[in-house]
Image (cartoon, rainbow, N blue to C red):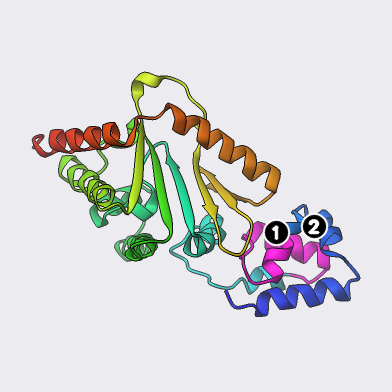
Amino acid sequence: MTNTYGEWLRQQREAAGLTQQALAEKAFMTRSHIAHIEAGRRIPSKDDARRLDMALGTGDVLTSFLPGGDSAIADHFAAARHLEQQASMIREFALSYVPGILQTDCYARAVIGAAFPPHSDEERDRHVVARLGRSKILSNPVTPVVWALLDEAVLRRPVGGPEVMAEQIMHIVRLIESGRVRTHVMPFGLGVYPLMQSMLTLMWFEDQPPAAYSEGLSVGKVHDSPAVVERLQAVYDLALGEALPTKESLALLKATAKEYGHRE
């Protein structure tokens, strides 16, 4: 994100005689979020940009000139994707499907192909390329540190069919065995546990406070309020404490992949 956008926001805020806290209150945002945008560390969502335009009386300038626009990235995920690329540690919780940074080509195509309204072939290809581009952060052998907490439903739902699932699960197995990703599975037998309401991503950074991202159907939200992020971290930790240990999780992944491999 070029800092021109953040600098322009700061100039407009100061011209209006507003502190970061005052602007945050008028735009129904947090002061820390305003500070991160002005420093060029975060991209506001379109909804945030609209509220900033309204609070500052700048028409639709902040909305129209959001940096890093990519039509293959959902509007509600754009800010979270930017943070994901900067994070030094990422902890994922997946309730229904494999987290985007761990998806294979065929798995991503199956997930994106289920969208409604349907994508054209060209649109689907662009979305797949954007999805797979996120996994490039794993090309660095050390950072970010990635943990994945997967509900067993993620493994049992045959997205794309048995062959696609076998390939996808073995991809995760290889990442685990290489030490690149730590994975735990929440077994069906556990019953109800914290986090079952939506997917969750927790992110830590070298030079800024931690953030979280939660997502549901066609909606997503970046959380940067320290109190909210701390609470979400606690909920994640509670769920992690109930998950299968690493070795048992790896064994379940391998056994499930083997089952898919024989289900022609």
**Crowding at mark 2 (Cα within 10 Å: few <14, some 14-19, many 20+):** many
- Residue ID at (68%, 59%): 48
Q: Are marks 1 and 2 in contact (CB under 8 Å)?
A: yes
Task: Quadrant for residue 46, please give it.
Answer: bottom right
Task: Quadrant for residue 45, please give it.
Answer: bottom right
**Crowding at mark 1 (Cα within 10 Å: few <14, some 14-19, many 20+):** many
Q: In the image, residue 151 lies at what x, y percent? A: 38, 33
Q: Secondary structure at mark 1?
A: helix
Residue 78 against residue 92 in the figure, above or below = below
Taking the magenta stretch, the answer to whether it contains residue 84 is no
Taking the magenta stretch, the answer to whether it contains residue 39 is yes
The mark found on residue 24 in the picture is 2
Q: Secondary structure at mark 2?
A: helix
Regarding residue 130, the answer to whether it shows in the image is no
Which residue is nearer to you in this view: 194 or 117? 194
Q: In the image, residue 90 lies at what x, y percent? A: 47, 52
Residue 69 against residue 74 in the figure, above or below = below
Regarding residue 243, the answer to whether it shows in the image is yes
Q: In the image, residue 258 lies at what x, y percent? A: 13, 36
- Where does the magenta region start and end? 34-59
Q: Which secondary structure class fits the magenta region best?
A: helix
Image quadrant holding the C terminus, namely top left
Judge from the rendering whether residue 146 lies leftward or rightward of residue 55; answer left or right. left
The mark found on residue 33 in the picture is 1
- Residue ID at (48%, 31%): 239
Question: Residue type at mark 2?
Answer: Ala
Q: Earlier in the sequence, mark 1 or mark 2?
A: 2
The mark found on residue 97 in the picture is none
Q: In the image, residue 131 lies at what x, y percent? A: 37, 59
- Residue ID at (43%, 59%): 144
Question: Residue type at mark 1?
Answer: His
- Residue ID at (59%, 52%): 211
